[in-house]
Image (spheres, rainbow, N blue to C red):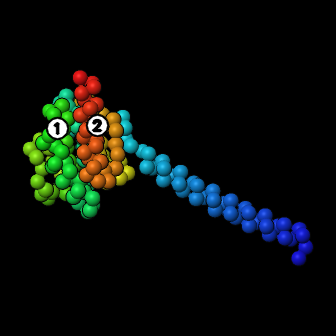
């Protein structure tokens, strides 16, 4: 084999490897862009819908009827919500019109698929912190009940600092 032929083959292999690596990096960047979209700064209120109590910070839990983690999230909300001060509340938004889980009285339930779809975060279950004006200030995936408890503590601390 001639040296130029060998060099062309080696260069072709290197270009193919670089293209594959570039395609992989492009895919990862797109995944990260999707994962970092959080909807922060978006007003989360519709004219006919009131999410949370006026003057209160609200933690909104977006859950799905086909989500195995959502059971744990709902159980954590039921455990944490009764101990929250009046300045912080929980709202559960479900896509299941037949939602039948037991929730404390201070947890608002919205089981409307249209409202569920309007909360545009790329993961479910999701937790959103909504300020007093109805603006989303933080979102995170709710991967466990511990995340719910931690976010509730942070929301209470944030509210106490702003008072």
In the foreground, 80 or 51: 80
Number of numbered markers = 2
Q: Secondary structure at mark 1?
A: loop
**Mark 2–mark 1 distance (CA, rounded to whole Å):** 11 Å
Which residue is at a point 53% across and 51% down the rendered structure image?
Answer: 29
Which residue is at a point 37% across and 38% down the rendered structure image?
Answer: 40
The local crowd at label 1, few if under 14, some if 14 to 19, many if 20 or more residues have their Cα within 10 Å, is some
Which residue is at a point 37% across and 41% down the rendered structure image?
Answer: 39
Q: Quadrant of the C terminus?
A: top left
User: Which mark is first along the chain, 1 or 2?
Assistant: 1
On residue 84, which mark appears?
1
Which residue is at a point 25% across and 52% down the rendered structure image?
Answer: 145
Q: Is residue 25 left or right of residue 56?
A: right
Examine the rendering and report whether any part of residue 42 can be seen: no
**Residue farthest toward the bottom in the current orientation of the protein:** 1
Task: Residue 85 in the image: state x and y as whole percent.
Answer: 15, 34
Residue of label 2 = 154
Task: Residue 68 in the image: state x and y as whole percent.
Answer: 26, 62
The local crowd at label 2, few if under 14, some if 14 to 19, many if 20 or more residues have their Cα within 10 Å, is few
Q: Is residue 34 left or right of residue 67?
A: right
Q: Is residue 112 left or right of residue 43?
A: left
Q: Quadrant of residue 129?
A: top left
In the foreground, 84 or 113: 84
Q: Quadrant of the N terminus?
A: bottom right
Task: Residue 70 in the image: state x and y as whole percent.
Answer: 25, 57
On residue 141, which mark appears?
none
Above or below, 30 relative to 162: below
């Amino acid at each position: 084999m001639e040296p130029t032929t060998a060099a062309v083959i080696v260069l072709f292999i290197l270009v193919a490897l670089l293209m594959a690596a570039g395609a992989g990096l492009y895919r990862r960047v797109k995944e990260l862009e999707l994962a970092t979209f959080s909807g922060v700064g978006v007003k989360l209120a519709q004219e006919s819908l009131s999410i949370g109590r006026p003057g209160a910070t609200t933690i909104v839990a977006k859950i799905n009827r086909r989500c195995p983690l959502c059971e744990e999230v709902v159980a954590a909300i039921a455990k944490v919500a009764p101990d929250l001060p009046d300045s912080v509340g929980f709202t559960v938004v479900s896509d299941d019109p037949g939602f039948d889980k037991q929730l404390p009285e201070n947890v608002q339930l919205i089981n409307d698929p249209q409202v569920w779809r309007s909360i545009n975060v790329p993961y479910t279950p999701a937790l959103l912190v909504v300020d007093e004006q109805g603006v989303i200030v933080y979102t995170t995936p709710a991967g466990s009940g511990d995340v719910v408890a931690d976010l509730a503590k942070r929301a209470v601390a944030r509210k106490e600092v702003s008072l």
